[in-house]
Image (cartoon, grey):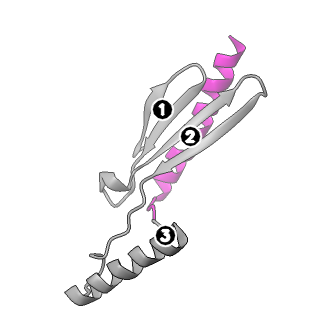
Amino acid sequence: MIEKSVMKVHEYDDSVTYRVACDCGSPECDMLLDLEIDSKIKMIFLTIYKTLLWSSYWGDNPWYTRIWMRLTCAVKMILTGYIEVTESFVMQEDQVNGLIKALEEGKQILSDNQKE
């Protein structure tokens, strides 16, 4: 059984997907873990999907600062082609344990399906 804030979303012969909830409670912060096995090379792949956001509304800035942030961000996107962002994911100990159990369970499911 998986712990608090970790839910199995899909299970197929060659992949298992889990949704892990952020402790902040916002569903926009959740991430998806996709474990997939390639039976030809006998390798398990872990892919983590997480939505990253950039907003000029973060913080307590006046309207002119927010507009300046948007302009500088747009110019950087035009000149470099990308914007770097970071996002935090808050987990308490029981959620970390759930994540570990999900990874172990997913690995076991994929291994068992390959033996069949």
Q: Is residue 37 above or below residue 61?
A: above
What distance separates the C-alpha of mark 3 from that of mark 1? 39 Å
Amino acid tagged 2? Lys
At which x and y percent is residue 77?
A: 46, 71
Which of the two discs, 2 and 1, labels the residue nearer the N terminus? 1
Secondary structure beneath label 1? loop
How crowded pointer 1 is (Cα within 10 Å; few <14, some 14-19, many 20+) is rated as few
How crowded pointer 3 is (Cα within 10 Å; few <14, some 14-19, many 20+) is rated as few
Q: Nearer the viewer, residue 9 or 40?
A: 40
Report if the CB atoms under discs 2 and 1 are less than 8 Å apart: yes
Residue furthest to the left: 63
Point 64% across, 28% down: residue: 108
Amino acid tagged 3? Ile
Q: Is residue 110 left or right of residue 81?
A: right
Foreground: disc 3 or disc 1? 3
Point 58% across, 19% down: residue: 13
Q: Is residue 33 left or right of residue 5?
A: right
Which of the two discs, 3 and 2, labels the residue nearer the N terminus? 3
At which x and y percent is residue 72?
A: 40, 82
Could you say which disc has been placed on residue 101 in the image? 2
At which x and y percent is residue 9?
A: 42, 32
Q: Which residue is mark 3?
A: 83
Residue 19 is a magenta residue: no
Point 54% across, 47% down: residue: 48
- The quarter holding residue 110 reads top right
The magenta region covers 88-116
Could you say which disc has been placed on residue 68 in the image? none
Q: Which residue is mark 1?
A: 1
What distance separates the C-alpha of mark 2 from that of mark 1? 8 Å
